Amino acid sequence: MTDKTILTVDNLALSYGSNPILKGVSMQLRRGEVVSLLGPSGSGKTTLLRAVAGLEQAHQGSVVIAGRTIYDAAAGIDIPAEKRELGLVFQSYALWPHKTVFDNVAYPLVLRKVAKAEIAQRVDAALKNLGLGHLAERYPHQLSGGQQQRVSIARALVYNPPVILLDEPLSNLDAKMREEARAWLRNLIVEMQLSALVVTHDQSEAMAMSDRILLLNGGVIEQQGTPQDMYSHPKTHFVADFMGSNNTFKGRISDVRNGEACVVIGEGLSIWGQRRSDASVGQEVTAVVRVEQTRLADGPGEHRAEIDLVTSMFLGDRFEYVLHAGDHLLRAWGNRQEAAGKRWLEFPPEAVWVF
């Protein structure tokens, strides 16, 4: 562990009975860094967070926080959750309904037997930092969802934990509030230089909030990297599919050259793309292209195909076109409404991945 590393998880494994959930996961979190654990339901992301927190019992591996070993299966070390000194923000917020905002935030300090004068000072500072100072005497049922979320974060931060763990922190908010809260939470993390591990199933949320993303699939890390790298350079079809909106084709390779492959996806329709596997001519593959990289063209040409435009949908900042290419339903984006009919569609080879 380097002096910049605040959390190290090494070869962590956990099972429910005979069902393995985590299969030897290793990761690091650096000081002041936000890492999102991203993945579909059942991928192991929440289980990994809970195992770090001490709320799930791993059977293999180790967890080290700020140089302190809090779990080591081989050495028989397993520090209880309440003594791991981690800030926890739960999906449900988990606020005491009978306690005021002040008392909810003060609770971790009361458990640690901090002096009353210091509790008042630290709680007041936490509430002020999160814009909650005027709500100190209110109860949770008197708060909006966004305010309840801030109270739960203030409670997690009030005793200055080395790492804050957030489990789907925005999932209980409506779409508009979620966008606003995402910006607010990212700003808070940057301003306070927090080290945070965040669980989410939403790739847009992960890309907006994170310095790095760990994408889990079936209890292992499928790929990790910066949001830009994960989005633009997926190593597998699973990563490409999960990290964006795509047009996906099944087909067979008809030609291979210079790191590219030509995929026949229907009668009279073939596309060239970047070869991301060792599949050879004649083998079945999947071609993937981001929706925003699929473009209407003004006529025939290289890497273009004539297909049927069915309808245009106005999305506020753009139009989305729905198109048919044989049995394939495709989408593309543009800046104006288009009438139904035959259109030329371009598939730039540099934007197509062949898995």
Image (cartoon, rainbow, N blue to C red):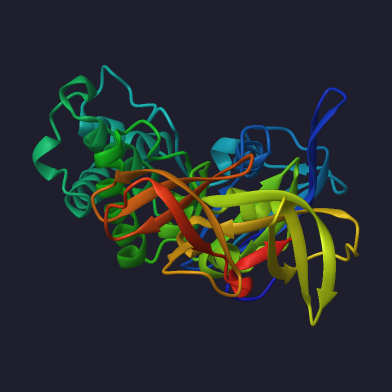
Q: Is residue 171 above or below residue 60?
A: above
Residue visible at 90% across and 64% down in the picture: 281
Residue at the far left in the pictured view: 134
- Judge from the rendering whether residue 304 lies leftward or rightward of residue 98; answer left or right: right
Q: Quadrant of residue 270?
A: bottom right
Residue 190 location (% of width, % of height): 35, 66
Q: Position of residue 45 (x, y in %)?
A: 63, 42
- Residue drawn 35% across and 33% down? 107
Which residue appears at 25% of the width and 55% of the height? 317
Q: Is residue 108 visible?
A: yes
Question: Residue 221, how many percent across, how many down?
Answer: 72, 53
Left or right: where 290 falls relative to 138: right
Determine the image quadrant of residue 261: bottom right
Quadrant into which the C terminus falls: bottom right
Q: Nearer the viewer, residue 288 or 182?
A: 288
Query: Which of 35 and 8 lies nearest the eye of the viewer?
Result: 35
| Point 83% across, 61% down: residue | 253
The relative height of residue 212 versus residue 69 in the rendered view (above or below) is below
Q: Quick check: can you spot residue 221?
A: no
Where, quadrant-wise, is the N terminus in this rendering?
A: bottom right
Seen as rendered, the residue at the extreme top is 98
Q: Position of residue 64 (x, y in %)?
A: 68, 57
